[in-house]
Image: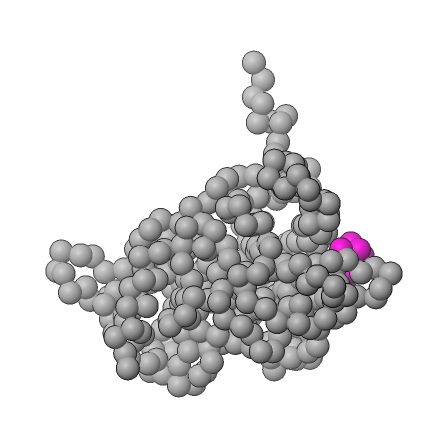
Amino acid sequence: MSDHTKTNLITLTRHVFQDQVENYKEASGDLTLLLTAIQIGCKFVASNVRKASLISMTGLANSSNIQGEEQKKLDVIANEIFVNALRSSGKVAVMVSEEDEEAIFVESQYQGKYCVVFDPLDGSSNIDCGVSIGTIFGIYKVKEDSTGQLSDVLRPGSEMVAAGYCTYGSCSTLVLTTGQGVNGYTLDTEIGEFILTHPNIQIPSRGKIYAVNEGNSKYWDGACTKYFHSLKFPADPKKSPYSARYVGSMVADVHRTMLYGGIFCYPADSKSKNGKLRILYECFPMAFLVEQAGGRATTGRKRMLDVHPETIHARSPIFLGSKEDVQDIEAFYKAEP
C-alpha cells in the first residue's frame, strides 16, 4: 500500500478552507484568499532570504525606518513584497507596517474588508550572520460601516481575527491562528506549498527555558530583577535553574517557546520606559497565538490583548509563554508597589 502522506498532503490553503467549511459556514472566503496572499508573500521573502548573500541583498540600504533603525536591504524588499501582495489581493483596506511611518490606505478599487498589521522582516539585524528571522502579522476586520480608517487598527488585540508568523531559517515555517487553535505549516520548496507539520500546537503549562536580553539587566525594575534571579537561583535547592536561550529575533525566540515552553520576555526598563516591542504588529499577534496555544501573555500588570494602542507604532513591555511561568512574573509585579 502506498504511503498516503505522500499523495494526500494537507496544505495551508486546504486546511484553512476546510476549517472555514466546518466552522464558518456563512463565511465568504475572503479571509482564506487574504491568507493565500500572505503565504505568497512569505514564499517570496523566504526565497530572497535563502539567496540574499548571492545577489547582494545583505548589508544596509542607507536608510532608516520610522523607528530610527537602520534598514537592511532585505527589510525594504520584504516590505514591498507584502504591501504589493496585500494590495493586489483585493481583500485589504488598511495596512500598517513597521517600515512605514504612516498607515497605508488601499485605493477604493482594490479595497477589501480586512486590515493587516505586520513586521515584514523581524530580527533583520541578524540577516548577515544567518540567524533565523521572520515575518509577523495580525489581521483585523474593518468595523461595520467603515471603509477603512485608522480607528480600524487602533483596537485591542482581542479583536484580531487571525495572526501568525513565518520563520526563515533552516526551514520556513508558518504558524497561524484564526481563533480556533494554532497550527504550523512547513514550506516544501520542491512543490512550493506550506504543508501542515505541526497540528494543534499546545504550549506546555510550564517550561525550563527563559529568553531575555540580560545585557539590559542593570536597567530592570525590581520585579524583573527578582523574577530572573528566582529562575537562576531557585529557593528550593531540589529545583534545577532554568536554561537561558536568547536569539534576539522575536520570531525565533517565540517559536522555540511555542514548541518547548518557558517564557519570552522583553520588559520595560529605565532605558525604554514603554518597552521596546511594538504593540500592533509584534506584541498582539504573538500574544494571540500564545493564548490560542494554551499559554499566557501579559505586560506584567495587564493582559497583553486588552491593551488599547494610541498610535500605530506604540510600544509595550511583554512577557509570554507557558501559563504558569507567566503567572509567576505577574505575581512578582503584583507584589511590587
Percent x, y of residue 88: 80, 57
- Is residue 89 rendered magenta in the image? yes
**Residues in magenta?**
87-91
Q: Nearer the viewer, residue 190 or 33?
A: 33
Q: Position of residue 313 (x, y in %)?
A: 60, 76
Q: Is the residue 118 above or below the residue 68 in the image?
A: above
Residue 215 image position (x, y, % from top left)? 38, 76
The front one of 66 and 279 is 279
**Residue displayed at 37% across by 72% down:** 301
Asked if one can make out residue 128 in the rendered structure from this viewpoint, the answer is: no
Residue 243: image location, x then y, percent: 30, 59
Q: Residue at x 56, y 13 (%)?
A: 1
**Relative to 72, residue 10 above or below:** above
Above or below for 140 versus 60: above
Looking at the figure, which quarter contains the C terminus?
bottom left
Quadrant housing residue 266: bottom left
**Is 287 within the magenta?**
no
